């Protein structure tokens, strides 16, 4: 006598696969070219945020200590300099606001 094999029930094949949507951000070529040009020339970079204009050095003129920091807060503080950092802090920014500000700084400096 032979033993009968048990088989697992199969899932219906006609069910459509869930749609996967991948969003990609297209870089702004003008912003990237402007940042690259400013870096090459050593020009300062301006960032508008919260109704204020912040002036940043060219990325090649950032303080060398910026490569040793462990977080974005300290990096932005070094790049802005103490006076502008304190001005920013006076605006009572939230974490969300800081993330937006940091993104603007990174974009303006070509990062």
Image (tube, rainbow, N blue to C red):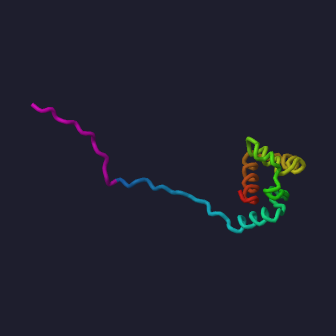
Q: Residue at x 78, y 47 (%)?
A: 66
The answer to whether any part of residue 52 appears in the image is no
- The dominant secondary structure in magenta is loop
96 horizontally vs 47: left or right: left
The answer to whether any part of residue 15 appears in the image is yes
Indicate the quadrant containing the N terminus: top left, top right, bottom left or bottom right: top left
- Image coords of residue 9 (percent x, y): 27, 42
Work out whether residue 56 or residue 62 is closer to the camera in this orientation and state it: 62
- Residue lying at the far left of the rendered structure: 1
- Image coords of residue 76 (percent x, y): 79, 49
Work out whether residue 52 or residue 42 is closer to the camera in this orientation and state it: 42
- Residue lying at the far bottom of the rendered structure: 30
Asked if residue 38 is among those painted magenta in the image, a careful observer would answer no
- Image coords of residue 87 (percent x, y): 88, 49
Indicate the quadrant containing the C terminus: top left, top right, bottom left or bottom right: bottom right
Look at the image and give the residue range highlighted in magenta: 1-14
Asked if residue 4 is among those painted magenta in the image, a careful observer would answer yes
Work out whether residue 111 or residue 54 is closer to the camera in this orientation and state it: 111
Residue 37 occupies quadrant: bottom right
């Amino acid at each position: 006598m032979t033993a009968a094999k048990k088989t697992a029930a199969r899932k219906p094949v006609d069910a459509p696969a869930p749609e996967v949507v991948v969003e990609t951000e297209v870089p702004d070529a003008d912003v990237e070219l402007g940042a690259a040009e400013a870096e090459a020339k050593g020009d300062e970079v301006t960032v508008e945020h919260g109704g204020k204009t912040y002036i940043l050095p060219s990325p090649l003129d950032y303080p060398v200590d910026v490569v040793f920091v462990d977080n974005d807060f300290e990096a932005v503080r070094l790049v802005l300099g103490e006076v502008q950092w304190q001005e920013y802090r006076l605006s009572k920014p939230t974490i969300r606001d800081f993330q937006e500000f940091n993104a603007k700084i990174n974009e303006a400096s070509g990062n």
